[in-house]
Amino acid sequence: MSKLTVDLQRTLEAPGIPADKDLETWAATAWLGEHPSEVTIRIVDTEESADLNSQYRGKNGPTNVLSFPFEAPAGITVPLAGDLVICAPVVEKEAAEQHKELAAHWAHMVVHGMLHLQGYDHIEDDDAEVMEDLEIRLLAQLGYGNPYETEETEKDS
């Protein structure tokens, strides 16, 4: 695993927000680059998430995670992956609604965001399948189950 420096910014404190060590471990596990890099993970409230989601994606309301890959000017090489902005209240609400362990959902959001920073996306079905397979594998390495399995899927197996 390549070295990844994680800069954490917490704009709020709330029960259920993971410890720094967990956030760092999840991000480092999802860093697939060959060279050391740096990422900023900013934990925000619904207001900041909604503002950023509107400004950068043209969508109303807060979202779970926003990824901002660093784009260096031509000819400049800087070891920055980019920024992840994670909305703690949205992650907590989704985990409850989806009957997921809160830490597992946090881990998924960090892994998902880190993959976006590295150019993975889920707009096209084929790309989504590649990204989801990678998320499942990385989360398994961290000791978490498949985030895309629903309770119904598990009961049918």
Image (cartoon, rainbow, N blue to C red):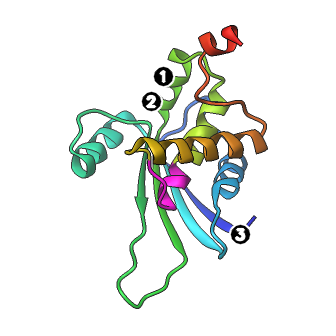
Three-letter code for the amino acid on which mark 2 is drawn: Val
Q: Is 148 part of what is drawn in magenta? A: no
Q: Residue 113: image x %, image y %?
A: 51, 49
Distance (Cα) linking label 2 and label 1: 5 Å
* Residue found at x 48% / y 40%: 12
Check the image and report above or below for 69 versus 137: below
Residue beneath disc 3: 3
- Magenta span covers which residues? 113-121
- Regarding residue 8, the answer to whether it shows in the image is yes
- Answer with left or right where residue 27 lies relative to residue 143: left
Circle number at residue 93: 1
Three-letter code for the amino acid on which mark 3 is drawn: Lys
- Answer with left or right where residue 34 lies relative to residue 59: right
Three-letter code for the amino acid on which mark 1 is drawn: Lys
Mark 1 and mark 3 lie on one chain; the one further toward the N terminus is 3
Circle number at residue 90: 2
Mark 3 and mark 2 lie on one chain; the one further toward the N terminus is 3
Check the image and report above or below for 156 versus 67: above
